[in-house]
Amino acid sequence: MTLLAVWPEDDPTTTLLRTTDHGEITAALTPLGVRFARWDVVDLPADPTSDQVLAAYADRVAEVTDREGYTFVDAVTMAPGADPGQAAAARAKFLSEHTHDDDEDRFFARGSGVFYLHLQGRVHAVLCEAGDLLSVPADTTHWFDMGTRPDYVSIRFFHDDDGWVASFREDSIAHHFPTFDQLVATR
């Protein structure tokens, strides 16, 4: 179940909002310029290729690319059976606060991950699950945690084929907040 948790940026022990209600999540994220939507989930093969995932969601992908002007779309799979070193490296890559010059739109076709958005003096953790589409606006300070055993299939949307180039912050607060594994354990 999708979860939104919000804390003051300087106090991860004080929860300002915690909800699994889609309407409340949307209402909290919309004023921040963050788009959040739910799509019906389509059955996929056990180990789908990018082409299979994109074909399964072709109509929805076309809607998003037409509306937002994306020119490159791909699908990625992170599976628990993957090389542990590779999974740990992939996870570590985006655990620190960073920004992108482009929007970061991601649809979860299977599994889950958490986007942490550092906006307006608060940290908004969005635990996305299968069926969730989240759009992080360009230049939004954020980080992403896929957990210690990554398990998801997601569709990523780009305005160019270079994808998202991250600009990392030296003074990241990410390590002060609950991780993916901690959020999942407490929902």
Image (tube, rainbow, N blue to C red):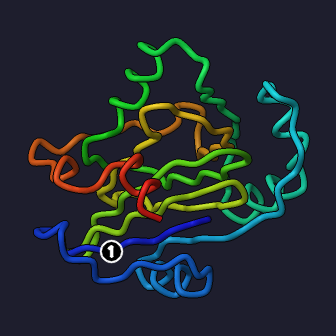
Residue 92, position as x, y percentages in the image = 33, 30
Between 31 and 162, which is closer to the camera in this rendering? Answer: 31
**Could you tell me which quadrant the N terminus lies in?**
bottom right
> Taking 133 as reference, is 28 left or right?
left
Residue 138, position as x, y percentages in the image = 42, 58
Q: Quadrant of residue 22?
A: bottom right
Numbered-mark total = 1
Between 185 and 180, which is closer to the camera in this rendering? Answer: 185
Observer able to see residue 100: no
Observer able to see residue 170: yes
The residue shown at (90%, 40%) is 55
Which residue position is annotated with label 1? 6
Q: Quadrant of residue 23?
A: bottom right
The residue shown at (33%, 49%) is 179
Residue type of the residue flagged with mark 1: Val
Residue 144, position as x, y percentages in the image = 40, 46
Q: Compared with residue 85, is residue 160 higher up or lower down, i.e. above or below?
A: below
Q: Secondary structure at mark 1?
A: strand
Between 159 and 131, which is closer to the camera in this rendering? Answer: 131
Query: How packed is label 1: few (under 14 Cα within 10 Å), some, or many (20 or more)?
Result: many
The residue shown at (63%, 43%) is 156
Q: Compared with residue 106, is residue 120 higher up or lower down, i.e. above or below?
A: below
Q: Quadrant of residue 50?
A: top right
Residue 108, position as x, y percentages in the image = 66, 50
Q: Compared with residue 74, is residue 187 higher up or lower down, i.e. above or below?
A: below
> Taking 4 as reference, is 1 left or right?
right
